[in-house]
């Protein structure tokens, strides 16, 4: 059969749904992160991150249908993201990853991606 996408391999929509829902529980619980999000309702932001990650890993392309080209670094420009914010984001994602079933290889693949992506979103080093 054709190579399975990583999206399918780790459990498809339910896995991404759980991952991103737990991630936003972490955002809600962490003032460093929560204060960065402009909207009171984190529901729409949760949907955007879920759609993006599903698309990135080979699932449905709903993100680009609704949002266009990701241009993530540009979309993060309005938010002051320093090392503390990056670390808080990665901590919330590490906790979220513990809520889904991943092989050690899958965990490493996902984590390497998140570290690379979070590093690339840092746009403010005034706190160094
Ligand atoms: C949007 C913070 C890293 C993917 C946002 C928003 C904030 C934010 C405040 C606006 C919420 C909204 O959608 O309304 C941060 C912080 C990061 C970080 C503090 C720390 C480094 C990342 C990473 C990814 C990501 C690593 C992807 C792997 C997204 C996506 C959106 C978004 C897809 C929605 C973009 C759109 O379509 O408008 N982020 N983010 N973010 N973030 Fe991040």
Image (cartoon, rainbow, N blue to C red):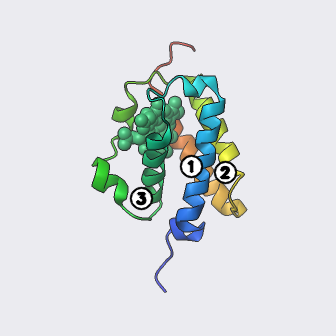
Nearest to N terminus: mark 1 or mark 2: 1
Q: Which residue is mark 2?
A: 97
Pointer 3: what residue? 55
Marks 1 and 2, Cα distance to the nearest angstrom? Answer: 9 Å
- The quarter of the rendered structure image containing the C terminus is top right
What residue does disc 1 label? 20
Along the polypeptide, which appears first: circle 1 or circle 3? 1
**At which x and y percent is residue 26?**
64, 37
Say what secondary structure mark 1 lies in: helix
Q: Residue at x 33, y 41 (%)?
A: 71
- Point out the residue furthest to the front here: 41
**Residue 128, relative to residue 116: is it above or below?**
above
Q: Choose mark 1 or mark 2, whichever is in front.
A: 1
The alpha-carbon separation of the residues under discs 3 and 2 comes to: 18 Å
Instruction: Decide: few, some or many residues near mark 2? Use Cα within 10 Å; few <14, some 14-19, many ≥20.
Output: many
Q: Residue at x 47, y 20 (%)?
A: 124
Q: Nearer the viewer, residue 71 or 105?
A: 71
Upstream in sequence: badge 3 or badge 2: 3
Secondary-structure class at tag 2 = helix
Tell which tag, 1 or 3, sits nearer the viewer.
1
Q: Quadrant of residue 108?
A: bottom right
From what the image shows, is residue 8 above or below residue 22? below
Q: Give residue 32's position: percent from left, percent from top.
A: 60, 23
Residue 121's label in the rendered image is none
Circles 3, 2 touching at the beta carbon (< 8 Å): no
- Camera-side residue of 71 and 63: 63
Can you give x and y, in whole percent of width and height, for residue 33 in the image?
A: 57, 28
Classed neighbour count for the residue bearing mark 1: other residues with Cα under 10 Å, few (<14), some (14–19), many (≥20): many
């Amino acid at each position: 059969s054709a190579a399975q996408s990583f999206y399918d391999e780790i459990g498809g929509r339910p896995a991404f749904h759980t991952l991103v829902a737990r991630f936003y529980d972490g955002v809600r619980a962490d003032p460093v992160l929560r204060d960065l999000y402009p909207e009171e309702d984190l529901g729409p932001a949760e949907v955007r991150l879920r759609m993006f990650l599903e698309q990135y890993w080979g699932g449905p392309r709903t993100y680009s249908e609704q949002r266009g080209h990701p241009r993530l670094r540009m979309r993060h420009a309005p938010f002051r993201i320093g090392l503390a914010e990056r670390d808080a984001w990665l901590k919330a994602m590490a906790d979220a990853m513990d809520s889904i079933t991943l092989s050690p290889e899958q965990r490493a693949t996902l984590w390497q991606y998140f570290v690379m992506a979070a590093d690339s979103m840092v746009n403010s080093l005034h706190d160094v």
